[in-house]
Amino acid sequence: MAETSSQKSARFRPAEVARALPASAPTLLADIYLTDRPDASSRVFRAYRGVPPHYHRECDEYLYVLSGRGTFWMEDKSQEAEFGPGDMLFFERNVVHALPTLLEEPVIFLTLDTPRRSPKDVVFIDPEEGDAAGFMERNR
């Protein structure tokens, strides 16, 4: 996989990139950035356990499900619904969302963040459930 921060174009195979993610991680998620530019970033990430309610201050997020199944909600817990391969989830910055249940693993997403999502941009509704350090393991 090529580093794209200085390139004008690139090709990616997200399923192949996903194979480079670890089988387990001490964090809730692990990711690999495909692109990382101020106006947008794209990543492949894997969820290792349920993710508590949180939001991002800096970006809107588009999540495309590459593999796995689970439940996800945005804005309101009463909207929790199952997702699977081929589904896409979208939410604007500051929208509370959660991935409470992993039903079939590995749960892997291709994500587009606009503008770029900093690895530190995560705010948990209950700070005792997590912080940026325990949220994401960044892989290259």
Image (cartoon, rainbow, N blue to C red):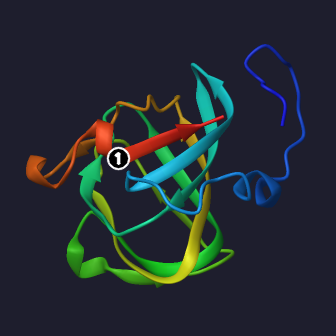
Residue 50 place in picture, x, y as percent: 34, 69
Residue 99 place in picture, x, y as percent: 36, 68
Q: Quadrant of residue 78?
A: bottom left
Residue 26 place in picture, x, y as percent: 38, 52
Number of residue marks: 1
Which residue is identified by label 1?
135
* Relative vertical location of residue 26 with respect to residue 73 in this rendering, above or below: above
Q: Quadrant of the C terminus?
A: top right
Q: Residue at x 46, y 55 (%)?
A: 25
Label 1, residues with CA under 10 Å away: few <14, some 14-19, many ≥20: many
Residue type at numbered disc 1: Phe
- Residue placed most toward the observer, 111 or 52: 52
- Residue placed most toward the observer, 98 or 91: 98
Q: Quadrant of residue 8?
A: top right
Residue 19 place in picture, x, y as percent: 74, 59
Q: Quadrant of the N terminus?
A: top right
| Image side of residue 116 versus residue 64, left or right | left
- Residue placed most toward the observer, 65 or 25: 25
Secondary structure, mark 1, is: helix
| Image side of residue 85 versus residue 63, left or right | right
Q: Residue at x 14, y 52 (%)?
A: 125
* Relative vertical location of residue 56 with respect to residue 77 in this rendering, above or below: above
Q: Residue at x 35, y 30 (%)?
A: 120
